[in-house]
Image (cartoon, rainbow, N blue to C red):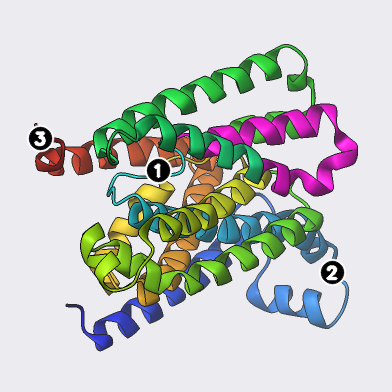
Amino acid sequence: MVSTARRIAAFLVTAAALFALALLAVNTGSLQVSPEQLFNGLFVAFDEDVSVVYDLRFPRIIIALVGGAAMAVSGVLLQAAIRNPLADPGIIGINAGASLVAVVVTALFPAWLAFTPALAFAGGMAAFLIVYSLSWKGGLSPLRVILIGVAVGTMFSGLMAAFSSTGGGVSSSVASLVDANITMKTWADVQTIAVYTAAGLILALLCARRCDMLALEDKTARALGVEVSASRFAVSAVAVLLASVATAIIGPISFLGLIVPHMARILVGTSHRALIPYAALLGALVLLAADTVGRAIAAPYEISAAVIMAVVGGPVFIVLLRGARATYGE
């Protein structure tokens, strides 16, 4: 049982680290501005350097923060809904399904761009339903969910790569989605991801009690008056919404929804009333850190945040899988 003081300390330290990292991210690159210059340029008088930072770096930073929060909370909800500590929207194919739809819409139906997050949600939900239905055999097996999820995700990723290489890849917008590159995002992208993610996070907080109940055995939850199947589907739908919206704007980011929930549980415990908001805060920190490292490590070139997360997340996934051997009967 994690104490209230420890939870408060975790929130405060993470928030402070996030603020410091955001300031660092603003000045990561060839153009740098002092805090005083930034403040004056934003609120006092026009400054050309601050204007460039405002138009190019601020949207990127905010999208990384919001997208990281969405992906992390999606992972928390999925792990609760299907009772699988290794569940992640990237691993079980949700990101690939959403990304495929987003790429098709961006390349072939540019007039529908405003509806891309909603259409991506449909793609992510289709992928989730395929995985869920194929994994069900008198109950959900963690091993079947992971294996079928990887297969479905690989299939959708292959379709997306094929589509991109045969015509859609000529678009820089399509390429940025395929590569999960946050470069050149605009304030319009910020508005889109912020609106949908805010709605998703509110729904996630409303699901906190259901998530706690789903952590119990199904028969125990039913005895407490919980409709297990309906609750599992509702929580999963919110998780798919959050992951799909982030994917529609950023592109597929793997392992973030896996790593952050486990880190958050260590720091604030398993109660979803604290876990969900803290995972959002920590997810924002992790994705912004990945993006900032990718911008700085090979300057003047950039490494996508998705690549950084894959390099870090792969070994973590292996460690978590080895630690869950009893669950899989190995």
Q: Position of residue 55 (x, y in %)?
A: 79, 58
How far apart, in angstroms, are the residues tagged by discs 2 and 3? 62 Å
- Locate residue 225, reporting x and y percent: 33, 72
**Front-lying residue, 95 or 222:** 222
Asked which quadrant contains residue 175, the reply is top right
Marks 3 and 1, how far apart at CA: 23 Å
Decide whether residue 95 is among the magenta residues.
yes
Is 4 situated above or below 206? below
Q: Which residues are magenta?
A: 93-120
Mark 1: give few (<14), some (14-19) or many (20+) Cα within 10 Å: many
Which residue in the structure is indicated by mark 3? 329
Q: Which mark is residue 255?
A: 1
Rate crowding at label 3 as few (under 14), some (14 to 19) or many (20 or more) other CA atoms within 10 Å.
Answer: few
Which amino acid is tagged 2? Asp
Q: Secondary structure at mark 3?
A: loop
Q: Determine the image quadrant of residue 1.
A: bottom left
